[in-house]
Image: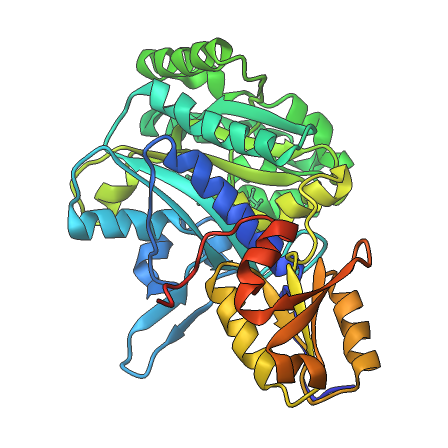
């Protein structure tokens, strides 16, 4: 047993899995950049105050924050999500609106680690600041939907709801509190405790005992103002126009407090753990102002990379192995030809690996076979002497003697043309 292991709730993302993560973010970038979103990289830690805006009744703030005092006596927290930091950045830099940004990065929440729930987890997401247009909500939702489709996922469902404006929400929470209190003797002890902190979260209870009470609860729809209702109708009409299937879920309240009007969640029906939400988001029109900036509406979402890849595993899509190797160099002389030729071929755009430590021909050929390379380039004493090499196609076992100076052209004839990585002229 080694002296140290990863901390609970964290994992090493090893190769080739880590390559799949990179491809995931690249595919996300491709989709959202086609709609004008630009990459933003906010810091991983901020003043704790930035994240307190997520809600003093939320688990994220009360139980899960990784906060500490730094050596300068500042109260700091590792980001539990990206949205608040991006609103802080907007208030600080005042870019022109609408400001459309995307991100990919880690977040930290001190949660009970379990399948699909980690203490360090990654998200990709988008945020748009500066527009109240309900059709922007639709664009944002569509970006998430199209991305899941591009991964090949079939079993993702979209749930939408409206939480109304601040006053609607406050009136609803009060009515909900009164209702839940009137039936509190039927609730589980956990739900009773949640009711004291945040009545909305009781609607999320997965306990069978709480179900009958939750089913009979008043819904937010009854409390929406005319403006909020009209906004939600346009969102629904937009989803219909794009033929994006959805379910209106009156109980969808989300776990962060900054939402107003539209909220949505993407849920994978292929995940059998309790953690089936692969993404979520909504409108947060008051957040920038809360952080000391000008009153600015906002809307966005974040998708959990860890969980979405678990969904990909269970649907057997977006599989990815190790990167393919074009050529493997076997040098049984002194390794200098392997050093020079691998450098030259990599510069010409090929993917090239080689053996080290002056191993025998047999042992190097074994590594070449295991690497999955298309060809082996072999340099023995004769080849080194004559400036040639033996090129062996590892798929067909065809073999030919090639002048080293013509290797680039010869390799291209077997594996295809490549774009040079460096100019070596
Ligand atoms: P969230 O619902 O807290 O929203 O997280 C979004 C997604 O991140 C979840 O659906 C889930 O896939 C993933 N996730 C959250 N916590 C964990 C965890 N402990 N382990 C693994 N995956 C996790 C937000 O973070 C908002 N900032 C989304 C947003 C953006 N709203 C507006 N703009």
Q: Is residue 24 visible?
A: yes
Q: Quadrant of residue 203?
A: top right
**Residue lying furthest front in this view?**
386
- Figure check: 276 above or below 213: below
Residue plotted at (42% across, 59% down): 79
Report the colour scheme.
rainbow
Q: Position of residue 168 (x, y in %)?
A: 37, 24
* Point 69% across, 37% down: residue: 187
Residue closer to the observer: 388 or 228: 388
Q: Where, quadrant-wise, is the N terminus in this rendering?
A: bottom right
Viewed as shown, does residue 61 lie left or right of 315? Answer: left
- Residue drawn at 45 percent across, 34 percent down: 31
152 sits to left or right of 166: right
Q: Residue at x 54, y 28 (%)?
A: 145
- Count of residue discs: 0
Q: Looking at the picture, how far across and down is residue 317, in whole percent?
A: 71, 39
232 or 203: nearer the viewer? 232
From the viewer's side, name the closer residue of 401 and 130: 401
In percent of width and height, residue 228 lies at: 35, 17
Instruction: Tell me the quadrant of the picture where the C terminus can be found.
Output: bottom left
Task: Kindly indicate the quadrant of the structure image that contains residue 112.
Answer: bottom right
Visible residue check, residue 302: no
Residue 179 lies, in percent from the top left, at 56, 27
């Amino acid at each position: 047993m080694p002296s140290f292991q990863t901390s609970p709730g964290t994992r090493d993302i090893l190769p080739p899995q880590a390559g799949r993560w990179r491809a995931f973010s690249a595919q996300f970038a491709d989709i959202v950049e086609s709609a004008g979103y630009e990459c933003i990289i906010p810091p991983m830690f901020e003043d704790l105050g930035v994240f307190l805006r997520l809600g003093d009744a939320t688990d994220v703030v009360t139980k899960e924050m990784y906060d500490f005092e730094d050596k300068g006596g500042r109260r700091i927290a590792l980001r539990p999500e990206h949205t608040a930091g991006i609103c802080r950045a907007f208030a600080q830099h005042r870019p022109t609106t609408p400001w459309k940004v995307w991100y990919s990065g880690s977040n930290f929440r001190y949660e009970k680690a379990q399948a699909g729930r980690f203490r360090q987890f990654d998200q990709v997401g988008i945020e748009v600041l500066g527009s109240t247009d309900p059709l922007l909500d639709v664009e944002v939702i569509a970006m998430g939907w199209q991305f899941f489709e591009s991964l090949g996922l079939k079993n993702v469902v979209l749930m939408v709801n409206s939480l109304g404006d601040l006053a609607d929400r406050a009136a609803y929470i009060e009515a909900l509190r009164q209702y839940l209190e009137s039936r509190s003797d039927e609730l589980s002890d956990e739900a009773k405790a949640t009711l004291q902190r945040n009545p909305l979260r009781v609607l999320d209870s997965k306990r069978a005992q709480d179900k009958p009470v939750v089913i009979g609860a008043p819904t937010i729809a009854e409390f929406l103002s005319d403006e909020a209702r009209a906004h939600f109708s346009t969102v629904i009409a937009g989803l219909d126009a794009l033929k994006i299937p959805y379910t209106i879920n009156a109980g969808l309240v989300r776990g962060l407090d900054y939402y107003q009007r539209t909220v949505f969640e993407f849920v994978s029906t292929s995940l059998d753990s309790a953690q089936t939400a692969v993404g979520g988001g909504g409108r947060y029109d008051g957040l920038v102002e809360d952080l000391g900036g000008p009153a600015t509406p906002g809307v966005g979402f974040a998708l959990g990379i860890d969980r979405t890849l678990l969904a990909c595993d269970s649907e057997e899509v977006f599989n990815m192995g190790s990167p393919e190797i074009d050529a493997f160099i076997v040098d049984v002389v002194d390794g200098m030809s392997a050093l020079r030729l691998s450098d030259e071929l990599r510069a010409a755009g090929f993917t090239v690996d080689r053996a080290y430590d002056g191993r025998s021909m047999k042992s190097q050929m074994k590594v070449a076979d295991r690497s999955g390379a298309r060809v082996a380039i072999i340099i023995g004493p004769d080849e080194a002497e004559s400036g040639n090499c033996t090129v062996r196609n590892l798929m067909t076992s065809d073999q030919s003697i090639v002048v080293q100076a013509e290797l680039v052209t010869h390799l291209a004839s077997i594996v295809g043309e490549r774009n040079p990585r460096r100019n070596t002229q």
